[in-house]
Every structure is written in structure tokens, then in C-alpha cells.
Image (spheres, rainbow, N blue to C red):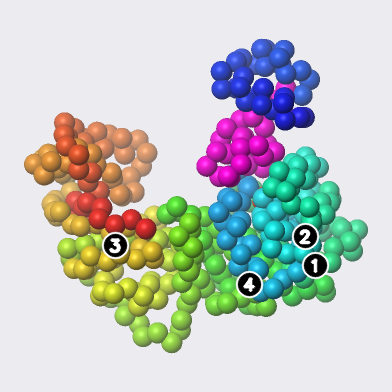
Amino acid sequence: MNEEKVRLAEELVRKGLDEKKLRHKLGPDWRLLVEIAKARIRARDKFSRDDLWMDLEGLRYATHEVVARYRAERLEEFGVRSIADVSCGIGIQVIFYAMKVEKACGVDLDPLKVEFAKRNAERYGVTNIQFIHGDSLSPEIIERITAEVIFSDPARPPEMPERKLEDLLPSPLKIYEAYKSKTDSFIFDLPPQMRREKVPWRGEFEYIDLYGHLNRLTFYTEPLARAERSAVILPAGVRLENDPDLEHIVEWTAEPGDYLYEIPPAVDYADLINELFHSLDGTPMMLLREKRRVLATGNELLRSPYLKRTYALVGTIPFHPVRINDFLRREGFGRATLKMSVPQQEYWRLRKRIEANLRGDRRAFVFRLGDRALIAEEVYSS
Ligand SMILES: C[S@@+](CC[C@H](N)C(=O)[O-])C[C@H]1O[C@@H](n2cnc3c(N)ncnc32)[C@H](O)[C@@H]1O
């Protein structure tokens, strides 16, 4: 496995060569080389470097660089000097932590991941990480590790039916038990949809949005907690914390005002809508709360890094594809984005009918509110 061979594999994969030719040109390691090449091609948006070492599984699990950097900066604020990542994968998070501490350690059960992580640390020019191959729950490894903070971003089996701590690999419950005699500072990545009651420790639940989508839920035990719940919007880098002393000002309305405000998923998941409303200059009201969409409304044009987008309402009409299409044509919209939950097969049919023969530069956003369609145009995006 060397750089030259991976570069060649990337070139051949891009050319679309078949298996036989790939094997012939790349030799006995061809399968792994092709996988690394494919992972690098797919990873383009995730990392600032294009020469990292990873297989496809490693890439899928790897922390996005923007998130890894944010979390390392947060750790730095606590003056932590050492950290051990006990399920480090291809090492992205531990590499960024290592940039902010004196000494770091990365452990993984999979020898290939450890090899990739070592090479990735070299790529980033980080030299203060000790990498260990092994089971972080085994007595030998537990004994070897001494660090002020234990971090774990466990693997989530895709078939995991209910989101439970026991099902994560390694389970945070077991990691806590194994290392609690060494430290009380733990950081765990948890499935963002997990119910907070399932976590048996006191601390902070930090929900992180990345480019408008919920990306991570990080749990910090008490010594590292700043609040009970928080939401972080990346790459903007703004943060909202719960404040139980605030007056409750969230009210609902069934009638949209002149503007629609899209609330970031992290704010909704962290139950911080009241805190968000307090931070805004206007007086919004809640309009819609669906699994993938939370909208508030009001008559002020609000711009805030805590809002995902602000839309100006152009019209409210009965929800019928033909009526919507007529309206969009009349108003000179050339494109429409459907902002509603529709089954995949139906989505394209609906979109085709709504977008039939549209002409113009304007882009409409179409929301569904009961039996009404709200046609809106974006005026602000954070
Ligand atoms: C979600 S990945 C970590 C990704 C990593 N944070 C990154 O930024 O690239 C989880 C890793 O935990 C490892 N793992 C699972 N059980 C383990 C155990 N008992 N000991 C050590 N590593 C384990 C898996 O091999 C996998 O690489």
C-alpha cells in the first residue's frame, strides 16, 4: 500500500476500468487499493486533504473535519492536557484533538483502521499520538491507558432497531465502567435521535448541525459540561445553550405571516426553540413541526445565524399540483423545491407536475401546511 499505487488506482477507477484490468494493473493488493481510491474520491467534501488513508467503512464513520476541529477547540477551552480516543477509527477526531493537547492516544479493534489512522496523523503532521491496536475493553488496554479525558465515537450497527447505548460498539456504558476509576471526564458520540433519558449520567447534550443537517450528538460528562443542552451550528460556529430562567415565549399560530423562518435541526433536537426566540430581534410564532422541518413565522425579516433560512411568503393556495403549477407560472418561477415529506416515488411525480413548463429565474420553495401550499422565496440563508 503506497501513495503511488493509490494514485494509480484513483486514476483507473475514474476511467471506469473493469475488475480484470484493475487486478492486472494493480497487482495482488488491488481490492484494497481500489477501495481506498473510491473512498478518497467520495471523501472530497469531508476533508481538506485529498491524500488521506481510509476504506469505505472508515470514511462513512469518520468525523467531518469541521466537526473534529470544533470539538478540539472546545476541549482546548478546558485546558485539557491528554486525551484517549478508545475507538479512533481512521483517526480524524483524535488527530484534531491531538493538535490541542500535549499527549493523545488512539485505540481501535481493527488493525487496518489503526494503520490508516497512523498514516493520517503523519499527513496532518501530528506526532503526539500513540496508536494502539486492541480492544479498549480488554484489561491489557485499560491498564495501558492514562488520560485526563476518555473520548469514544462508537460504531452504530446500521440494523440497530432502537437507539440504545448497549448496542453501540464499544458501548459507552462499558467504556464508562472500564475507565471510571481513572477519570470522570468522558465525551461520547451518541446517535442524535437517541432519547436523552437513556443516558444515565449528568452532563451536556450538544447537538451539532453541519451545513444545515443534524450531524452529531456529543455527550460531555459533568466536568466538561457547560449547560444541560446546547446546539452548535457549523461552519458558522455559533452556539446556543439552554437557560431555564428564561420566560416561556413560544406560541403557536395556524396562520403564516409575511415571513417563514426555518429552524436548524440542532436547535429543535436540543429543545432550544424558546432560547432561540429570545435571541431574535422579532416576535416569531411556531407554525409547523415535522420530523425534518421546523418552521416559525412572523412579519419581520429576521436574519440570524441561528436560523437556517428566512423565506418571504409569496402566496398561500390550496395544496393541489395543478393549482401550485398555475401559481408558479403566473409569478414567473422557473424552479420549485418541495419542502415537505413525500415518499420517494411520489416525490418525482409531484415535482414533475409542479414544475411543468415553468420558465424564469426565480426559485420557489413549496411547503405544505395541512391542505394548503405555502409558496415562498428565500431571502436569507445562514
Ligand atoms: C465510528 S468509528 C470511529 C471514527 C472516528 N471517530 C473518526 O473520526 O474517524 C468506531 C470505531 O470503533 C471501533 N471499535 C468498536 N469496538 C471497539 C472496541 N471494543 N475497542 C476498540 N475499538 C472498537 C471500530 O473498529 C470503529 O473503527
What label sits on residue 261 in the rendered view? 3
Where in the figure is residue 308, as x and y percent of width and height? Answer: 36, 59
Residue 141 appears left or right of 382: right
Figure quadrant of the N terminus: top right
Q: Mark 2 and mark 1 in contact (Cβ < 8 Å)? A: yes
Main SS class of the magenta portion in the image: helix
How crowded is the residue under tag 2: few (<14 C-alpha within 10 Å), some, or many (20+)? Answer: many
How crowded is the residue under tag 4: few (<14 C-alpha within 10 Å), some, or many (20+)? Answer: few
Q: Mark 2 and mark 3 in contact (Cβ < 8 Å)? A: no
**Residue designated by label 4:** 77
Q: Nearer the viewer, residue 198 or 32?
A: 32
Secondary structure under tag 4 reads: loop
**Callout 4 amino acid:** Glu
Q: Earlier in the sequence, mark 4 or mark 2?
A: 4
Where in the figure is residue 215, as x and y percent of width and height? Answer: 52, 55
* Rendered residue at 77%/24% (across/down): 29
**Residue designated by label 1:** 147
**Residue designated by label 2:** 104
Q: Mark 4 and mark 3 in contact (Cβ < 8 Å)? A: no
Secondary structure under tag 2 reads: strand
- Evaluate whether residue 18 shows in this view: yes
Image quadrant in which you'd find residue 204:
bottom right
Q: Which residues are magenta?
A: 30-59
Nearest to the eye among marks 1 and 2: give it: 2
Residue 139 appears left or right of 374: right
Where in the figure is residue 77, as x and y percent of width and height? Answer: 63, 72
Does the segment drawn in magenta span residue 143?
no
* Rendered residue at 72%/58% (across/down): 98
